[in-house]
Every structure is written in C-alpha cells, then in structure tokens.
Image: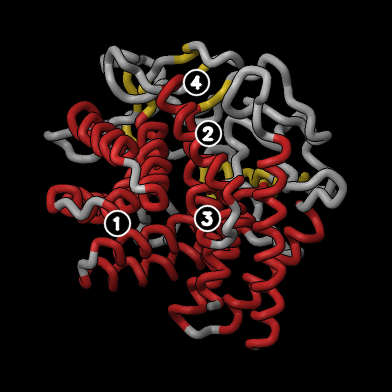
C-alpha cells in the first residue's frame, strides 16, 4: 500500500505545482489590477466579468498556504497582490466588512454583506497572516469576525443569519446563488464560518473565539446532520424549521473531514470524538452519490426525486480528502480505494491536459460542461489546491 501512496503523493505534488502555475500565468489582470473575474476554457479572460470576493479571498488563502510546499517568491507575490486588492477594492470603509463583488475595474458592483463571503475573507486573511505576520491582516480578520458576531449572530435562536444589505440592514433575497433556497440559515454558510473561525483561532487563540467554535459544533451537531440518513440538512428558516431542498453529496463529504478538523483545532475532546463519528457517517452518506467510474454525482433533488447527473470539479476534490480521512479513522481499505478511484477519475475526466487546470465538470455522457468558467466567481484554486495539500500532508 505504501508504494502506491508514495506514487500518488508525487502525482499530487506535481498537480499542486501545475494548479499554482496556471493561476500565476493566467489569472492576473495586468490591465485593471488584481485578478480576472472569469477565464474561459481556452485560458482567455472574459472581458467585463465581475470580480467576486470569494475568488479573491480563496486566491489569497491558496497562495498563502502553498508557500509551505513551494519556496517561490512569485507565489508570495500573488498573496500580496490578493491581500492588497481586497483592501483597496472590497473593503467597505463606510459600513465595515467586505463587498460581494466589484466590476472589472474594481469599482463597487454589489455591496451586500453575504456572511459566506465575510467568512472566506477571514479565512484568507488568517492564512496570509500566518506566512507574513502582517498586523493589518490580523486586525482585518478580527474586525470581520466581530462584525459577523454583531450583525449575523442570532442571539435568540442561535446560529447565523445569511446576508445583509451594504449597511447591514435586512435583505429580501438572501441567496448565495440562484440555485439556492432563499432561507435565513444555511448549512453552507455555517460550515464556512466555522472553517474561517478555526483558521483564525490558529493565529489568534482568543477564548471568546474558541467558545464560538464549540457553539458552532454544537449547532451543526444538533441541526445540520440528519440522524438517520447521515446527509446534511441544508436550509432552515430563522426558527430552525427545515426547508427540504437537495442532497449535496459534495458538501456531505467535505463537511465530514472539515468539521472533524475544526473540532480538533478547538481541542475539545468530546467534540473531537463526536465529529470523528460524524465524519464516517457523512462519508457513507455521500457514497450514495458515487458512480461506477469513481466520480461523485453533484446533487439529488429531493422534491422531484431526481439525480442531477453532472460531476462537478469540487466534489471530486473533496472526495479524495473525505475518503482518505475515513480510511485513517477506520482502517478500512475500501475507503482508501475510493480515494484512489477519485484521483483516477480526476486525472482521466477533469484535468485539461492541453490548457491546464480542471474543467468545471462533465455530464452523464462524459462530455465537458460548456459555458462554465475555468476560473471565475466560484471556480478558484481552493478545492483542488487544498485537496492536494491535505493528501500530501496526510500521506506524510
């Protein structure tokens, strides 16, 4: 088994280098500053595309993290570029927090305060501080944490409300994207708040922050993980009444290993043990979305009882980590074989061997999904870059 693991580790190191080189070569907008809002499958920038907060925050996180693996000053320069662009163009100096999007030239486009986006900015700033020691990055991350707690935290019902206007007032449409249910509390946002808070806690071990992390673990344990099916429950109103929508296989398997990691960062043994069990349960639930070729289907529409027969890039990346983690927890080789199969699927079906990076996804007939970004508002080096780093570290 170890020889095969060593081979995969070397492949993943090469893949991480390829991903980083792709983003260094194609993502920088030398015309307007920062990074292109969208790049097509031919590696051409899409002129006029908006520039999203999530893309920029994830670039900041990824390039800050990869300095551990590749000692290259050019990579750190990308981190500096992302850090400065966020401060210059996304920081709302009037109302605090960060904008959701700017236009191609860096002018305010959408000023809404999507808590998901605030969280990813904490995530990126914390990683940047870890490699640079920048006091500005730490202060900015803490300020965002305090704003989330001030405006988003539901004191009465607990949990975090989804989104606000630019001035932190109420919004009618709270959705992250058009496909999401318009509900006040979502699994996706809570997952990435705890991810961000845990990253911040590693560099700023504040007692109050730790209490918030453990409270999030309790909330997620209580509301978001279905006791019988093991799947995540995704959408709720402010009173924790569930709104049935879809089963997201990618989120199931991502949450499994990621929540366990957050519990481990908290240092609370009872929650560590609890979320190790959840990690296996969520992985088993996600396996209901596995196809025979090793790929993970995107979602299952519960209302119409219909499988969404697409295989997007990010659930495949999360599958590698989730299955490897389940193997580490249980010792059952079937999980490790699923991890190997995920990587094989990615290499054979998702890697663009001509133009680099990963395709957005493939359809049921194995055709490439067209009309989607190679890089863009949601397509970032975060899922696939992180998967490479996690597996490299775990193989050791």
Neighbourhood count class around disc 3 (C-alpha, 10 Å): few under 14, some 14–19, many 20 upward: some
Q: Residue at x 81, y 48 (%)?
A: 352
Comparing marks 4 and 1, which lies closer to the viewer?
A: 1
Comparing marks 1 and 3, which lies closer to the viewer?
A: 3
**Which of the 4 image quarters holds residue 387?**
bottom right
Q: What element carries label 2?
A: helix
On residue 81, the disc is 2
- Vertically, is 366 above or below 80? below
Q: How far apart are marks 4 and 2 (CA)?
A: 17 Å
Q: In this view of the protein, which residue sits in the foreground, 145 or 234? A: 145
Question: Which residue is label 3 attached to?
Answer: 67
On residue 202, the disc is 1
Question: Which residue is label 4 attached to?
Answer: 101
- Vertically, is 292 above or below 355? below
Q: What element carries label 1?
A: helix
Q: Which of marks 4 and 1 is nearer the N terminus?
A: 4
Examine the rendering and report whether any part of residue 66 can be seen. Answer: yes
Neighbourhood count class around disc 4 (C-alpha, 10 Å): few under 14, some 14–19, many 20 upward: many
């Amino acid at each position: 088994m170890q020889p095969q693991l060593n081979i995969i580790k070397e492949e993943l190191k090469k893949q991480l280098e390829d991903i980083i080189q792709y983003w260094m070569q194609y993502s920088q907008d030398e015309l307007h500053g920062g990074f292109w809002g969208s790049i097509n499958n031919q590696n051409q920038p899409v002129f006029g595309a908006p520039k999203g907060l999530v893309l920029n925050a994830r670039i900041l996180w990824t390039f800050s993290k990869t300095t551990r693996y590749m000692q290259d000053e050019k990579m750190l320069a990308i981190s500096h570029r992302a850090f400065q662009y966020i401060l210059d163009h996304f920081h709302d100096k009037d109302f605090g927090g960060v904008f959701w999007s700017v236009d191609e030239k860096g002018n305010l486009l959408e000023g809404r305060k999507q808590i998901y986006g605030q969280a990813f900015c904490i995530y990126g700033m914390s990683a940047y501080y870890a490699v640079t020691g920048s006091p500005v990055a730490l202060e900015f991350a803490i300020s965002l944490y305090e704003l989330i707690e001030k405006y988003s935290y539901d004191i009465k019902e607990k949990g975090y409300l989804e989104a606000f206007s630019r001035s932190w007032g109420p919004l009618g449409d709270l959705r992250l994207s058009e496909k999401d249910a318009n509900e006040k509390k979502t699994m996706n946002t809570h997952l990435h708040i705890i991810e961000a808070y845990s990253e911040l806690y590693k560099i700023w071990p504040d007692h109050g922050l730790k209490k918030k992390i453990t409270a999030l673990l309790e909330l997620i344990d209580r509301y978001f993980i279905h006791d019988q099916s093991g799947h995540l429950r995704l959408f709720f109103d402010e009173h924790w009444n569930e709104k049935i929508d879809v089963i997201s296989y990618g989120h199931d398997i991502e949450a499994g290993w990621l929540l366990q990691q957050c519990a481990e960062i908290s240092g609370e043994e009872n929650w560590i043990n609890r979320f190790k069990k959840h990690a296996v349960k969520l992985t088993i639930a996600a396996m209901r979305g596995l196809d025979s070729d090793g790929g993970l289907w995107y979602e299952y529409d519960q209302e119409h009882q219909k499988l969404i027969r697409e295989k997007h890039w990010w659930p495949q990346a999360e599958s590698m980590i989730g299955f490897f983690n389940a193997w580490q927890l249980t010792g059952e080789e079937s999980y490790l074989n699923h991890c190997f199969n995920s990587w094989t699927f990615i290499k054979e079906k998702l890697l663009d061997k001509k133009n680099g990076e990963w395709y957005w996804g493939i359809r049921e007939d194995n055709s490439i999904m067209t009309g989607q970004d190679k890089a863009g508002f949601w397509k970032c080096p975060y899922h696939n870059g992180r998967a490479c780093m996690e597996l490299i570290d775990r193989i050791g």
